[in-house]
Amino acid sequence: MIRETLALTKRELLRLGRNPQAIVTSLLLPILYLVLFGQAFNFGNLFGGDSAAFVPFVRGAPTYFSYFSAGMAGFVAVTATLFIGANVIFDKLFGILKRIASTPASAASIFGSRLIAGSIQPIGLAFLVLGLAYALGHLGLSGLQVTAAIGPVAAVQIVLAVVILSVMFAALFLAIGFSIEQPQTYFAVVNAINLPVLLTSAALYPWGILPGWFKTLASYNPITLAVEVIRLDLFAGAPQYYPESAWVYLLGLLGWAAAMILIATLLARRALAPRQ
């Protein structure tokens, strides 16, 4: 099973590498968000440039753009997983998946290989967003300001947050792709999941302007949990504004991941079961 999974994973990665247009296209959205949306919304001006008054609204981040950049990493880690399931549907329409299923490869290998290969791009995009946001600060624009000393523990926490978030949504959308036959239906279903999750998170909104009921809802959102880990590790002033440590938020994120991957496994097993 391991050999089959590795072979199919290599195949998926080679196919991704032969389609540079898809990679370039996937980069456009985070770049536009950072260069346009992030630069345009300077909430600090609402406080007359008084950064001390503004910091509580962004939970210890030095600027809104820094707060926004960490949120965008989580945002991109989720949105980039949408196309993983769509690729499965197109493979079914063109008969590619049927040919793969006729080989000795098990259903677990088929699902696992696509999950591994499909998760690499969202993870890479999330860290690309952080790198680009940091680089913008050296180009005369608003940029990500890292005010905390990032040691090995903090680096591991950030990586875990991004990887867990990407893998859990990739598994769910991949399983939905195996279960649905038409691309129109697929995008309707995943948008019904994706948009409410994104819009009820604290990825983009300044925390201090949110109503109490929204804060309660956002506190349990998996995207919020991942983003809070990133902000706690990037900004020295952040810990006093968060009730828990980064490890607690990671534990909550793992709980979400276990639930989503269980659902995804059940959906994929049913979809990939031999037809009678």
Image (cartoon, rainbow, N blue to C red):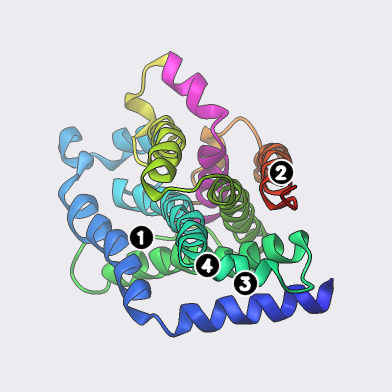
Q: Which residue is mark 1?
A: 144
Tell me the residue that label 3 is attached to.
99
Residues under labels 3 and 1: Cα distance? 47 Å
Label ID, residue 95: 4
* Amino acid type assigned to the residue bearing label 4 in the image: Gly
Q: Position of residue 184 (x, y in %)?
A: 36, 45
Q: Is residue 224 left or right of residue 108?
A: left
Query: In the shown orientation, is residue 13 left or right of residue 23?
Result: right
Q: Residue at x 19, y 45 (%)?
A: 42
- Residue at 52 percent across and 67 percent down: it is 95
Residue 202 vertical placement versus 226 (above, below): above
Mark 2 lies on residue: 270
Labelled pair 3, 4 in contact (Cβ < 8 Å) = yes
Q: Nearer the viewer, mark 4 or mark 2?
A: 4
Magenta region, mostly helix, strand or loop?
Answer: helix
Work out whether mark 3 precedes mark 1 in sequence or the reverse, and give the earlier one: 3
Q: CA distance from mark 4 to mark 1?
A: 45 Å
